[in-house]
Image (cartoon, grey):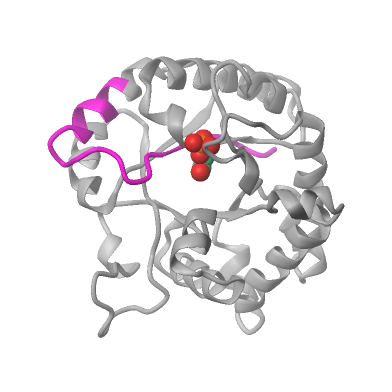
Amino acid sequence: MRPVVVAANWKMNTTPGDAGELARTIAARTVVEGPVERVICPPFVCLAAVGDALRGTGVAVGAQDVHHELSGAYTGAISAPMLAGLASWVIVGHSERRRDARETDELIGRKLHRAAEAGLRPIVCVGEQLAEREAGRADRVVRDQVAGILAAFAADPTALATSRLVVAYEPVWAIGTGRNARGSDASAMAETIRDAIAAAGWPALAPAVPVLYGGSVTAANIGEFLAEPAIDGALVGGASLKPDEMAGIVARAGLTASARVGTGG
Ligand code: PGA
């Protein structure tokens, strides 16, 4: 049975002065009965404050990125060992980093490998551009992203198998735009992603990998995604800074999580 995960990606918002209070408020407003894994990913400089605020709440802390090397002459960068004690999860390969930092599948794979080595639970993002979907190529693009990223584990397959990998399907055209994928399309893509993981050499791991949907998720539309058995939660951007929205999203996720525990699947 796959877990239900709701991860908040705060992106470049909040400061060390206000992040702790927001985290504490969200933690208090998202207490639900079902076993939902809650994660908050603030900017690097807010990790310590958010970690302090979340101690004892059951909400985990994640970073938004990690460097592909362990140390060295990389001005401004943060490596996996530096995150020890500050984060237990990490987002890797977000489309905004593909866009702004020119991250490639190969580089994202190296980052994922570093996260796995360090015991950071990775949320790896994949997703197509609008033109690619309109051209009927979304499936191919996402398959190629998965294959390109997982190639980093060709010589070390166990590291991926034990990484507790989570994948977020985030169609680029749905991020921050108020436009959503359809639940049925997101569900089909979740199956494509698991298929690609199996095809890349991890057939036993594939069915156990949680796939989240991301892209303008709100309390009002989360139900469409969680109604799909192939989808295991959400990676939430804009709405994750709003406690009311997070309360609604996690409440809905709690229903799914409870139902899964109840039915054993
Ligand atoms: P959004 O962002 O919810 O603001 O669309 C999602 C994400 O980028 O992870």
In the drawing, does residue 45 fall left or right of residue 12? left
Q: Which residues are magenta?
A: 1-25
Q: Looking at the image, which residue is at 60% across and 71% down? A: 105
Q: Looking at the image, which residue is at 82% across and 32% down? A: 184
Q: Looking at the image, which residue is at 73% across and 28% down? A: 264
Q: Nearer the viewer, residue 250 or 216?
A: 216
Above or below: residue 199 compared with residue 133: below
In the rendered image, residue 131, in percent from the top left (x then y), is placed at 75, 53
Above or below: residue 112 compared with residue 55: below
Count of labels in the image? 0
In the rendered image, residue 265, in percent from the top left (x then y), is placed at 75, 31
Q: In the image, is residue 11 part of the stretch drawn in magenta?
A: yes
In the drawing, does residue 255 fall left or right of residue 90? right
Residue 210 visible somewhere in the drawing: no
Q: In the image, is residue 53 part of the stretch drawn in magenta?
A: no
Residue 59 visible somewhere in the drawing: yes
